[in-house]
Image (cartoon, coloured by chain):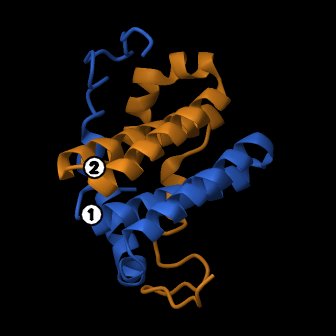
Chain colours: A orange, B blue
Amino acid sequence: MDLALFQKAIAETYLERDAERGMSATVAWLAEEVGELAQAVRKGSPAQQLHELGDVLAWLASLANQLDLSLAEAAGRYASGCPRCAGSPCSCSEA
Amino acid sequence: MDLALFQKAIAETYLERDAERGMSATVAWLAEEVGELAQAVRKGSPAQQLHELGDVLAWLASLANQLDLSLAEAAGRYASGCPRCAGSPCSCSEA
């Protein structure tokens, strides 16, 4: 699954409606889905966890769409190791 | 950027340390990064927003790694339109 194609699919499916609601509503919805993911991690099945991971990713993509930013570019910062120490594995001291 | 390759890069860079801290610490860190993203959406520059989008994505990938689940599979649920109504654009009534 290519991240840019995923973000495009989310735009085609949801951008018009999500943009109408506005950015703050999208941030609120993302927070809600992170809460559902946290609950699934604590007491959900793997299928539920997978479902919630997908929902968080979808809201993150919707937010990126509204910001006109690329998730693939955002991810690129981590593509060749830790962006702080450049190590892989990371050798930063605990922040 | 392929989502599976991104998740693998995050595993190579962070999995050993993140797994040592445990799943709850990763959930807490993800929540912290979502907060930073929310702030950047409200008053940050596009560069800061891009940075925070990447950080949320990285913690989401770390969580998926610890759950032994695939972000690409999670994203796949949205690949051909809305998973509820199957429409693209989505034609679900407001939930």
Q: State yes or no: discs 1 and 2 in contact (Cβ < 8 Å).
A: yes
Place of residue B68 in the rendered image (x, y in percent of width and height, measured from the top left): 22, 64
Parent chain of label 2? A
Depicted A76 relative to depicted A71: above or below: below
SS of the residue under disc 1: helix
The C terminus of chain A sits in image quarter: bottom right
Depicted B18 relative to depicted B69: above or below: below
Place of residue B49 in the rendered image (x, y in percent of width and height, measured from the top left): 68, 50
Residue count near mark 1 (Cα–Cα under 10 Å), binned few <14, some 14–19, many ≥20: some
Which residue lies at the image location 62% right of the left edge and 56% below the top edge?
B52
* Residue behind mark 1: B67
Q: Nearer the viewer, residue B64 or A13?
A: B64
Q: Nearer the viewer, residue B84 or B95?
A: B95
Q: Nearer the viewer, residue A90 or A31?
A: A31
- What's the residue type where badge 2 is placed? Gln
* Residue behind mark 2: A49
Say whether residue B5 is visible.
Answer: no
Parent chain of label 1? B
Say whether residue B68 is visible.
Answer: yes
Q: Residue furthest front?
A: A43
Q: CA distance from mark 1 to mark 2?
A: 8 Å
SS of the residue under disc 2: helix
Q: How many marks?
A: 2
Q: What numbered label is drawn on residue A93? A: none
Place of residue A10 in the rendered image (x, y in percent of width and height, measured from the top left): 42, 31
Depicted A77 relative to depicted A10: above or below: below
Depicted A93 relative to depicted B44: above or below: below
Which residue lies at the image location 72% right of the left edge and 49% below the top edge?
B40
Q: In which quadrant of the rendered view does residue A19 lie?
A: top right
